[in-house]
Amino acid sequence: MAVTAITRLPELLVGFDTETTGLGVRSERAISYGFAVYHYTRPVATEEFFVVPDRPIGEGARRVHGLDLQALEARRAVADVLTVAEGARRALTLLRRYHEEGAFVVGANLTGFDLPMLRWTARDVLGGEEDFDPRSLRTIDVIDHELVVRRGEPARYRRSLTSLCRRYNVSPGGHDAVGDARAAVEVLIAQVVVNNAGQVELPLNGPPTAAGGMVG
């Protein structure tokens, strides 16, 4: 579905992000999953868990998020560190639960990377146990939405989550999954203010049907 400018947000938004072993959607793995839940534009919950991958963590990816096997093992003292199968199953369970509650899942390059990677991982490690199609979710990709928000402007900056945080004065996530999940939702809220001609006093929330064109 074509993306249009969003002027009203649904009641429940769930930021979603992963940090990974690399950039191959079908060949790499998530090593952390992050969720940031917003109700009426206010943060109400976060969840992050880690995964020991079944393949090497690429050097380029490690330089971005700073996670190697030693760092993942050290997280066991303060966070859940799961197998690939356990991580995929838990992420799918959360996404389905939030979908049933009416949520829209928000992220940066969400439908081009994070959700397809989860789908291929689930196929690999869970087999017929899980049948997940990202298109079944209600999604908002802030990078796609930015193309609509700034339509007609010259592309003078990189359309990445980091650059969008800088543009909208949002605290960046720092390339950890839950931080980037939170940042994506905060960017979306700021984009909607722009779509409302900068009038922050306008109510941002409305029924999901009023936020047309946001489904990825």
Image: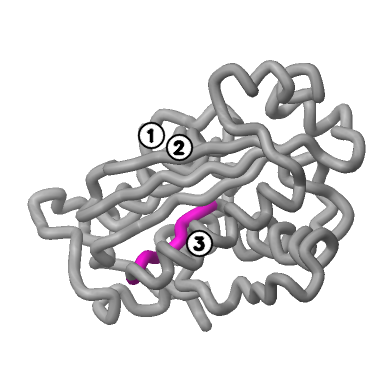
Label pair 2/1, CB-CB below 8 angstroms: yes
- Secondary structure of the residue carrying numbered label 1: loop
Q: Earlier in the sequence, mark 2 or mark 3?
A: 3
Q: Is residue 196 above or below residue 160?
A: below
Q: Which residue is mark 2?
A: 165
- Please tell me whether residue 148 belongs to the stretch shown in magenta: no
Residue at (45%, 61%) from the top-left corner? Answer: 105
Q: Judge whether residue 92 can be spotted in this image.
A: yes
- Up the image or down, 201 lies above or below 162; here it is below
Q: Amino acid at mark 2?
A: Cys
Could you say where residue 29 lies in the image, as x and y percent from the top left? Answer: 79, 47
Horizontal relation, residue 13 to residue 139: left or right: left
Q: Which residues are magenta?
A: 102-107
Residue 111: name its quadrant: bottom right
Q: Position of residue 53 (x, y in %)?
A: 81, 39
Most foreground residue, 146 or 34: 34
Q: Position of residue 135 (x, y in %)?
A: 59, 77
Vertical position of residue 44 compared to residue 172: above or below: below
Which tag, 2 or 1, sits closer to the chain's start? 2
Q: For mark 3, what is the residue?
A: 95
- Of mark 3 and mark 1, the one earlier in the sequence is 3
**Few, some or many residues within 10 Å of mark 2 (<14, 14–19, 20+):** some
Q: Which residue is mark 1?
A: 170
Q: Secondary structure at mark 2?
A: helix
Distance from the alpha carbon under mark 3 to that under mark 1:
25 Å
- Residue 151 visible in the shown view: no
Whole-Å distance between the Cαs marked 2 and 1?
5 Å
Measuring 24% from the left and 53% from the top, which residue is drawn there? Answer: 39
